[in-house]
Structures are given as structure tokens and as C-alpha cells.
Image (tube, helix red, strand yellow):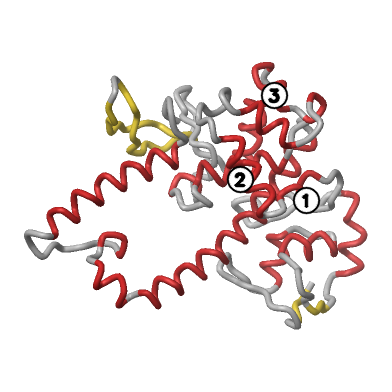
Amino acid sequence: MSQFKTRIERNNYIREQKKEKRISRAKKSAPLLGTAMILAPAAISINSVKVNAAEVGQTQNQSAFIEQLGASAMQVSASNDLYASIMVAQALVETGFGSSSLSSAPYYNLFGVKEYSGGPSVTMSTQEYLNGQWVTMNEPFAVYGSYSESFQAHASLLRSSYYAGAWKSHTNSYQDAAVYLTGRYATDPGYAGKLISLIQTYGLTRFDTPGAGTAVESTDQGQTQQTASNGSEATQTSGQSYTVQSGDSFWGIAEKFGISVDQLMADNGWTSATTIMPGETITI
């Protein structure tokens, strides 16, 4: 994270600078273009239908990503006196809704944590703001086995006394925690507003509810663990059919039947791009 921006904002700034240079060169010659982001205006209008379709798919992926994060954050936050909603919102900001390669399998690094102690790591190119200019550097980033591990490492950081003002027991609401983190976790003066907006827009406070019954995220072997309180319920409801209702989400259905989001998706052959529709019959 730079001195003035979050990692995602910094990378967006670099992309914009490179984009302006490419467009300037395009006026002099016909360049070989790699992405639609730097196409000439005429080409963009021709491909508008494809762009819109891509945006729909992106929205579907974002929804599934949020549910996966929430399932893991709930387990970690409950035992660390933290707001799961805050942790999920932070992960969304840091990863650009899961668009960063570092946050994806097999790395699962949601918060751009670097590793200098000899633990599992991957070396990636990153932009650092040094001596008044952006410098490209190769840095070692921590590698985790799952989102749960990444959240646990982040929780260990937030449990330090430096962030005590963001703990549940020291605040009245997630808004208080977001405000406290601004200027400490991130120097961006708009950081609290971004977290609060994400929490309200995507209803992330549902992950702050104690004992909501979601299971921890599946491990890299594809196995899941259910909370003991829901073990009998899952046994009783397995093999049932359920008709999707208006307003249902992956997480909501999983909670209702006492199973994990990963298990629900596996039972129905879904992927992160799947969208469920009211009236659809699914298997529990």
C-alpha cells in the first residue's frame, strides 16, 4: 500500500497513465492492441454489446466472490472480536472485487501481505511510490491455502493494540470501526466512506450476525467443515429440493439449510459465474 493511496487506486492510476500514452501513439500509427480498454472510440461503440455482456458476467462473479469471503470472514471475526463486514469490505477494496491475480487460487492473498520471513511466497511485480515517483519492483507476497487463512492473518494484524479502536468491544457499530481504520490502516482520507458504502450496498452486515450457521470455506482438497450446531440439521435436510425465492442468495440458502456456500455450489454443479433465478429448483 502506498503512502497516499490504496493498492487498487494506485494500480488504476498507473493504468490510466499508460492508457493515455497508448492513445497518443495510436494517432500516428495503427497499433496492435491487447484489450478493449485502449481501443479507438469507433471500435468501442462497435463492441458495446460484448462489453455489456462482460459486465453482467462480472456482476455474477462479484456476487459469488462476496459470498465466499463472507463465509470465511464470519468464522475468523467471531473469535477475534472483529466485524466480518469490515474485513470483507477491506478485501473487496484491496483486490478490486477479486480481480487481482494475487487474491485468486493458488495464492489466496486478499490483503497484499508481503512475506519476508521465509514462509510460502510468490514473487510478483508491484508499483511502489518512492522518492516522489512510481517504481516497479519485484516483491515476495505471502501465499495462503485458503481465504480463511488470509483472513486469519489479517485478523492477527487487526488484533494488535494499534487497531484496538476497530474491535467490536470498543465500538458501537461497524461505522466506528471504519472511521478508526482511516489514517491507521489506510492513509486515504476517503477510506471509511468506501468501506461503509460497500457494506451498505452489498448488505455485508449479515456476516456480522453471531452463529449464522455458515460453514468454513472449503480447503484446497475440496473438503468442507460444518459447524457443530448445524450438523444434525444438515443431515435432516440433505437430498431435498428447494425452489429459489425472490431475494435469495447463495449465502442465504446455505444458511437456511445449515451447509456451506461451497457445498451448495458443488451439489448443484455451479461455478462462480452461476446466477440463480426465482422459481428455479435446486438440490440441497
- Note whether 217 is above or below 256 in the view shown: above
Q: Nearer the viewer, mark 2 or mark 3?
A: 3
Residue 69 lies left or right of residue 93; in this view the side is right
Residue 77 lies left or right of residue 60; in this view the side is right
Residue 225 lies left or right of residue 28; in this view the side is right
Question: Label 1 is placed on what type of residue?
Answer: Arg
State the image quarter where residue 132 is shown: top left
Q: Nearer the viewer, mark 3 or mark 1?
A: 1
Picture disc at residue 147 = 2
- Give the residue drawn at x 59%, y 28%: 182
Residue 260 lies left or right of residue 141; in this view the side is right
Residue at the limit of the structure toward the top, as seen here: 161
Q: Quadrant of the C terminus?
A: bottom right
The number of numbered badges drawn on the structure is 3
Q: Residues within 10 Å of mark 2 (few under 14, many from 20)?
A: many
Q: Quadrant of the N terminus?
A: top left
* Residue beneath disc 1: 206
- Note whether 71 is above or below 193 in the view shown: below
* Residue beneath disc 3: 159
- Give the residue drawn at x 60%, y 71%: 274
Which secondary structure lies at badge 3? loop
Q: Residues within 10 Å of mark 3 (few under 14, many from 20)?
A: some
User: Residue 119's x, y, as percent?
Assistant: 50, 29
Cα distance in 3D space between marks 3 and 1? 22 Å
